[in-house]
Amino acid sequence: QVQLVESGGGLVQPGGSLRLSCAAAGSIFSRNVMGWYRQPPGKEPELVASITSVGSTNYADSVKGRFTISRDSAKKTVTLEMNSLKPEDTAVYYCNLGITYPNGGVRDYWGQGTQVTVSS
């Protein structure tokens, strides 16, 4: 069983910065993708950024140039550095881990979510 524990988040003024971290506990196979999703109030969840086990990254257009995702595979952690935050970045942010098992099966794991509020 895999568990994801998030930290970071909170209230920040527009233009400010925050860092979200997520640590995975349990057995993680090497073929995996770690990432962050967010769900703004009253909206559907959306992918913010992801990073594969070989370091390939993917970002939502709305955060390119402002957010940076990184991972430490040895420590089983993923970090999202968020800069130049805007009010529209306000959302609950969820850590995600997608694992492809040796038998070909795929499973997603989710963190409990952390609130990010950008407001003056």
Image (spheres, rainbow, N blue to C red):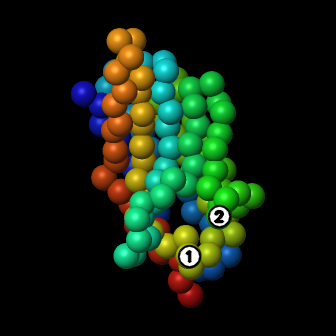
Q: Quick check: 88 left or right of 111?
A: right
Q: Is residue 36 above or below residue 114?
A: above
* SS assignment at label 2: helix
Q: Identify residue type, mark 1.
A: Glu
- Residue 66 placement (x, y as % from top left): 70, 61
Along the line of sight, which residue is nearer the eye, 45 or 17? 45
Q: Is residue 38 visible?
A: yes
Mark 2 or mark 1, earlier in chain: 2
Label 1: state its secondary structure. Answer: helix
For disc 2, the marked residue is 62
Find residue 113 and report its image quarter.
Answer: bottom left
17 relative to 2 in the view: left or right: right
**Foreground pick, 59 / 95:** 59
Q: Quadrant of the N terminus?
A: top left
Circle number at residue 12: none
Residue furthest left in the image: 1
Q: Residues within 10 Å of mark 1 (few under 14, many from 20)?
A: few
Residue at 65% over, 64% down? 62
Determine whether label 2 and label 1 are within 8 Å by CB.
yes
Classify residue 72 as left or right of residue 55: left
Q: Amino acid at mark 2?
A: Ser
- Residue under the image location 46 percent in, 54 percent down: 37
Q: Camera-side residue: 53 or 6? A: 53
Disc count in the image?
Answer: 2
Residue 12 visible: no
Residue behind mark 1: 88
